[in-house]
Image (cartoon, rainbow, N blue to C red):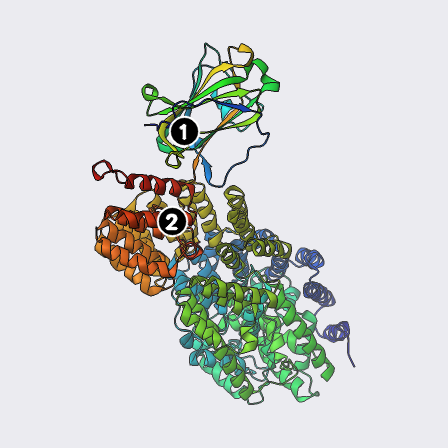
Amino acid sequence: MATESSEGEEEGKLTGGSPVLSEDDDLREKGKKASWSVSSWKSGNGVSSLRDDSLETYWQSDGAQPHFVNVHFEKKVKLQLVVLYVDYKLDESYTPSKVSVRAGDGFHSLKEIRSVELVEPTGWVYISLSGNDPRETFVNTFMLQIAVLSNHLNGRDTHVRQIKVYGPRPNPIPCQRFQFTSPEFNTYAFVR
Amino acid sequence: MKKTKTKPQISLLSLSLSLSLSESKMKEEAMEAILRNTVQNSLRHFMYKNAIFFSEFLCAEFPSEANLQLLASCYLQDNRAQCAYHILKGTQMAQSRYLFALSCFQMDLLNEAEAALCPANEPIAEVPNGGAGHYLLGLVYRYTDRRTNAVHHFKQALSLDPLLWTAYEELCILGAAEEAAAVFGEGAAICIQKQYLHHTFASHNSHVSEEDRNLTSSRNLVSAEEVSPRQLKQLSGNNVREVPGSCQGMTTSVRGAGQPPNGVYHLSLYNTPSPIATQFSAAAPPPLCRNLQPNGSNTSTAAADSSPRSTINSTIQAPRRKFVDEGKLRKISGRLFSDSGPRRSTRLAAEAGANAGTNAASVAGNGTNNSSKYLGSSKLSSAAFRSVTVRKVPNWANENFDEGMRNEVFDDCRSNIVSGAGALPSVDNKALDQEGATMPCSGVLLNNSKVLTGTAEILSLLRLFGEGYRLSCMYRCQDALEVYSKLPHKHYNTGWVLSQVGKAYFELVDYLEADRAFSLARRVSPYSLEGMDVYSTVLYHLKEGMKLSYLARELISTDRLAPQSWCAIGNCYSLQKDHETALKNFQRAVQLDSKFAYAHTLCAHEYVALEEFENGIRSYQSALRIDSRHYNAWYGLGMVYLRQEKFEFAEHHFRTACRINPSSSIIMSYLGTALHALKRNSEALEMMERAILADRKNPLPMYQKAKILESLESFDEALEVLEELKEYAPRESSVYALMGMIYKRLNMNDKAMLHFGLALDLKPSATDVATIKAAMEKLHLPDELAEDS
């Protein structure tokens, strides 16, 4: 079950977007082992364009709003961050405006954990899934859904060029609850 | 007064002409001789293109197997194993088979190499080239996973030639080495001495009795062996393996094992249809070494001849003499019959004479299968040969010749050693050199007593090297370090030894000392790559990014084609957590040398870091295929299975790693973890105790022990252990976190809060922060509602 933010639904406005994706050492991209699907798509601009590491290709929806991107994981994963690449300059009315991130065990039990409004974004947009409480740094879930509720200039369909999903790096040492911090421990932690 | 080479040749020729051979035949012989001489000269000067050109010319003009061998050796010198492979395919002479096997080995065609060295349809055929052949065969068996056979052949190689250090190294790696004191002990001393002292100058020449003919051997290589191991170590990084002292069969006769004298190689010439001239020239250079066949007449003649006058100067002979120097041979055979001249030349002549005939028919004498092929023809030709040689009577029995010879052989010797790749050991040549009893070793004539002391000295050092290496391979690193420390300074402060010392410290998890040893090694031999892959791992462990990248850059500029350099670069990237690039670099190392086990293991570590477990498992298994005693790979597999929660597999693999390296506390502690996961807690605790004892500096087993005790609800004991652990590692967040957890379970909330706070102060990872804070929150909840975190 997704943990709810203790303050209820949050509205946040995000502007801009960085041209370069900067990955934190602590984080690991979890999307590779997930199953991705979209609610609708135009022929030739399907879900694979979301994961092909190319900013030239994009997913284009083809139906009524809201449009969904569904991410199913094999087992419950801890997630911390969702990053989208969208570009107002290129996509104009296709650029998403209101985005809602939901999590849950399945389609029937999705609950919104984060909702943002993008204002003319051009580049990578970081949507953090953490709550204020340190206990809520991560969202432990089977499924994530990224919903595009509306677009700029009231466009019907949307373009998203790339999506990445991040969670914490697992403990390099298996069967360990806590990670080691001191050099004394780390020296003896493994054989190379 | 120095005479040039050509002069003697010409006078020799003119003399020959005056004898009964036809003019044209002499011309051919001369031609062949000149060509072979040219080839040899070029090889000596590393002018491979020239050598190859003339060898091909030679083969076209005088097709014979001996010439083919010469051409093949040129190709091998020039690193063109595939060319050598093609020209030697199907040849049967022992020497050809050896070269062919070498080419196959370099081309990774191990089955063919094996077939050449050890023909399937001739089960009792002799392995060509004695010690060298056995060594090569041992390598083939090792890389085709037939450990017992490999061990057998390496041992054979060592018994034939105790100075085949690399064979001993291989035995250590396979975990089957006997103590160095035994291998490099009395028996070895005797063997080596015999090889030097028994320069029996077979009879007096004209009489080439059947028995005498048996006296051929190329013990000349012995000398090679002396110099080669150390030099090889320092000279050829990667090729040491492929260059088994290419010694032509060290005399096996000492042990009574029948070995085809090297002369055989040349004798098989007689099988090939070639004009007598060719035969003559080919066989001409008599392998002037003695084959100590335990053949009655032989030994007696030998004994008779090997008078105390044995000037065993031949010690530092070119081990891999590429080819007979025709000219020199003629000179020698000429001396054979010159009456005048200094004592040395007479002796020389005497030897030469005897050998000339001897060699020719030596095969005949040997009752080996190989030689039987040549029996018939050789007998015939030997007669011819003999007669021919006898006729050569150049009469310069001069000292100059000796000098010249001396210098030449010396150069050859050195150049051969340096050249590395398996050269064509032409028996004759070596024999020649040896007999050139004029070959003083460093200008000092060797006599019996000097040989004895020299040998003893060498062996005493080898015992130290050997024992140290053997102990390192068994991971008895403290003992190994002790042994190495007994070496004299001049030997200790060499790249090889310091590298070994570094590796020993690495295995003892004393990375600082290892760093010191390795950096000393680099200062002493900055061009050597031996052990540098391990050094890069040491720096990785020490998290010395700067030093590591510096090392990597230096290694790459020294040798772009060495796997160690790419391993160092890979470690650099891995330290920066760029696992994909690290993986690419390790894969490059694998491409450069697929037999470099550590590169495979490093690839596997990166795959695991990227969570590509299947690939990781595959790479670990590749490493184990190459070296089944590579405990890092066993450990790696155990870790993967631990992660995948296949605890039984994990236990099995950790146990195997433990068996190989019984002193590693890290492996023991992981074995304990696996046992704990399998709920075999008492065994787990026992293992942790063993780990703690094995290395007091390792805090992990104590931590694991505390965890196990906690799970068994022995909270007080667990806390006790953790308190002790706090002394060892006061700044380890996980210790406080675990203590906090335990206090929480004991409902000692104040203490729990205190420890959680301490844990947080030490800046654990984000995940852990979340866990700890969640636990702290729950401390305020009443017990019924508290969930275990």
Image coordinates of residue B509 in percent, x first then y, are 43, 61
Image coordinates of residue B604 in percent, x first then y, are 44, 47
Residue projecting furthest to the right: B1
Horizontal side of B329 relative to B196 (left or right) equals right
Residue visible at 33% across and 23% down in the picture: A106
Horizontal side of B573 relative to A129 (left or right) equals right
Front position in the image: B644 or B353: B644
* Label 2: element kind: helix
Front position in the image: A191 or B708: B708
Q: What whole-number distance in Å separates the C-alpha atoms at marks 1 and 2? A: 34 Å
Per the image, the residue denoted by label 1 is A34
Number of other residues with Cα within 10 Å of mark 2, as a class: few under 14, some 14 to 19, many 20 or more: many
Q: Disc 2 is attached to a residue of which chain?
A: B
Per the image, the residue denoted by label 2 is B759
Position above or below: B517 against B620: below
Query: What quarter of the picture does the N terminus of chain B occupy?
Result: bottom right
The answer to whether residue B535 of the structure is visible from this angle is yes
